[in-house]
Amino acid sequence: MNEIAYRIMVFIAGLIMGTLYFGGLWLTVKKTLSSKNPALWILGSFFFRVSIVMVGFYYLASSNWQRLLICVLGFIIARYIVVNYTKSIDEKQIPLKKEESYET
């Protein structure tokens, strides 16, 4: 396969893994707020998310540091995308109260 096409696919895979990782983190935090056993959710989600990402990095890099760097770049960009997306969702769901002024 053409090296440029493979690098583009590695970048897209990094975006997908980052979206799964940080989106899963967001969903885990939302679920733990209403869960009876939040530690189980946090630990289970952590090990699941990390194992997927580490296996993905291992196979996508295939002993090539440039591919690993490109994959990590996609992963980091996905973090910013997920943070901005989830921030807009959270702002729509949680109505903020006006702070009362106690000044006289």
Image (tube, rainbow, N blue to C red):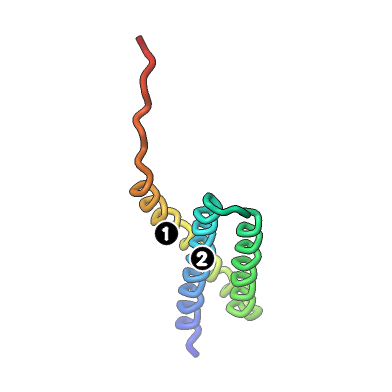
Q: Is residue 50 left or right of residue 33?
A: right
Q: Is residue 78 above or below residue 58?
A: above
For mark 1, give the secondary structure. Answer: helix
Q: Residue furthest front?
A: 36
x, y percentage for residue 21? 54, 64
- Residues at badges 2 and 1 in contact (C-beta under 8 Å)? yes
Q: In the image, what residue occupies the spot 34% across and 30% down?
A: 98
Q: CA distance from mark 2 to mark 1?
A: 9 Å
Point out the image quarter for the C terminus: top left
Residue shown at 60% from the left, 53% from the top: 36
Q: Is residue 3 above or below residue 25?
A: below
Q: Could you tell me residue 1's position as x and y percent?
A: 50, 90
The quarter holding residue 101 reads top left
Mark 2 surroundings: few (<14), some (14-19) or many (≥20) residues within 10 A: many
Residue underneath mark 1:
81
Q: Position of residue 49 (x, y in %)?
A: 59, 66
Judging by the rendered image, the residue that carries numbered circle 2 is 18
Q: Say what amino acid the circle numbered 2 marks.
A: Gly
Residue 56 vs residue 74: left or right?
right
In the figure, residue 65 lies in which quadrant? bottom right
